[in-house]
Image: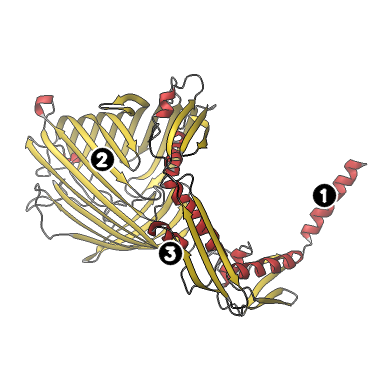
Amino acid sequence: MIRVLYLLSLLLIFTSSIFAKEIYIDFKNNHYFDDKELYEALGLKTPAWYQFYKDRRAKVDKKIVDSLYDILKNFYRSEGFFHATITKEDSNETVTFVIDAKKPVIIEEIKSDLDRRYKKLIGQKRGDRFNSNIFINSKKEIKKALLKDGYCNANLNAKAYIDIVKNSAKLLYQLQKNGICHFNDINITTPKGIDKKVVYSRLNFYKGSTYSLKKVSDAYSSISGLEAFDQVMIRENRSNELVNLDIKVKKRAKTIRKEIGIGYETNLGPKALFRWEQRNFKGDARKVSVDLKYSKKEKYIKNTLFWPAFTKAPFFDKYYLDFKNEFNYYSIEFDKFKERKLANYMHLLKDYHNFSIDSGIGFERIYIKKSGEICNISDGHFFLLYPFLNLIVDTRDSKINPKNGIYGSLYMESGLKYLASDTTYFKFMSEARVVKSFEKLTVALKAKFGFINEFQKKLPESKKFFAGGAYSNRAYGFNKLGATDSKCKYMGAKTIIDTSVEADYWLYHNFAFAAFADSTMINEKTLFFDTSFKNGIGIGIRYLTAIGPVKFDIGVDPKNHSTKALHFQIGQSF
């Protein structure tokens, strides 16, 4: 009997949902907010931007209209309109909320003893309309900033005094910082097969270091980034100005991952990909992977071994270095030559806060075959053995879709004949990026500078600089922009300056329109600068996903409109 009643109740709910009366929600006399803000405040979804054929208003079940009235009333109060009156006008298909906001509450005075750094986080100033959400958020942001700066025992007293008769507000912020906190005992618990040093190597602090909430957050991200654990737990225990940490990890149950995919690249055409990866290979969070790629112009097989906490850093025995080995066979067709390469790269790596260092030794066995008689391009076999060093500083707020911050890198490598390299040379490449956002507008600037100095014998052409493509000058295809002298075109360059400026305007949360200008100087001589820059301008669209923005760009050379290119990429280039 109970089962029958249960089924009947389910049927009743189902049939009532089918015949539920849906109506449009509209607004009238809404002078302070646009309709989209009010729909969002009510938790209602309007048709997507591409559904231009639909009514732009939200539609809801008529039964919930009364609850929407209460939510809208509270929204206006939170925005400082304590005297707002809202009435409803009903029709068969629409409920219209008629709004009379009346006079808002204005901030008359702000008293605070905050330092300048924290005062900026108040978010409101004298003469502004009082906003309770901004006030509440300011307390959260100030406390977060205090924890970031090491004040784990700070006392913040923040109050808002509202006079609804005079429509005025007075804000009070009082702060007692107390002392700077420090890390004390760091207790690490790991499962069998995982040495504690692996987890410890992800920490950018040790006992006695100044406490910071960001350091703890970075540690969580870094430990999780090993992809060796299903669960990472960090618990803080504070005693006065000392912070004890308990860190516990749970080993990943599923260690093998396989991926197969097909796709398309603007520069290479259709492609097929396969990846096999084993995490926790032989324990201690090691990872081994095999990658295969096949396309008409590019083919490779790559084997990678990553070994965290491989050895202690020289002279800094509190820090560990990671080891990575990459072995690959690579074949690619350029416009004027084909290349096959057998290579191995051994890395020692360390990330510390916003700074990364990658040093190691690479060897490459390269075979170049010219496509026709191209002057100054040498073909045949080349053997290169060289140490390399890459230094990176990255303060961007996100690597996937940065809104603010800077990125800088310096890369150097040097081949020496007495170390068995066929060529003695020095290669240098630097890059700087700046990203700044202004509400819906994000502006990004990027500049690269590089040069190569050959001392004995020539380098293979693929080791020199080319430009063009989705990450370079977008008026040209991938590596279509090479150096030129009086006799030759499309040669690899020994000096390059490559710059870009881009503005992205976010029309919606995940969708943006982009405009850009790129400029490139590329020369066959070392440290030779001239004014013969190749320029590209264009437009594009951006759609933000969990793995980064999907980008479509079309660029054209303003001096030669026949030179143009269409680019598609996934991932951020700034």
At x 62%, y 70%, the residue is 76
State the residue position of label 2: 391
Residue 165 image offset from top left, x and y in percent? 62, 77
Considering the numbered disc 2 on the image, is that residue within a helix, a strand or a loop?
strand
Considering the numbered disc 3 on the image, is that residue within a helix, a strand or a loop?
loop
Question: Is 369 above or below relative to 315?
Answer: below
Amino acid, disc 3: Glu
State the residue position of label 3: 439
At x 48%, y 27%, the residue is 187
Residue 192 image offset from top left, x and y in percent? 50, 19
- The answer to whether residue 336 of the structure is visible from this angle is no
Amino acid, disc 1: Leu
- Whole-angstrom CA distance, mark 2 to mark 3, is 32 Å
- Whole-angstrom CA distance, mark 2 to mark 1, is 63 Å
State the residue position of label 1: 10
At x 74%, y 77%, the residue is 91
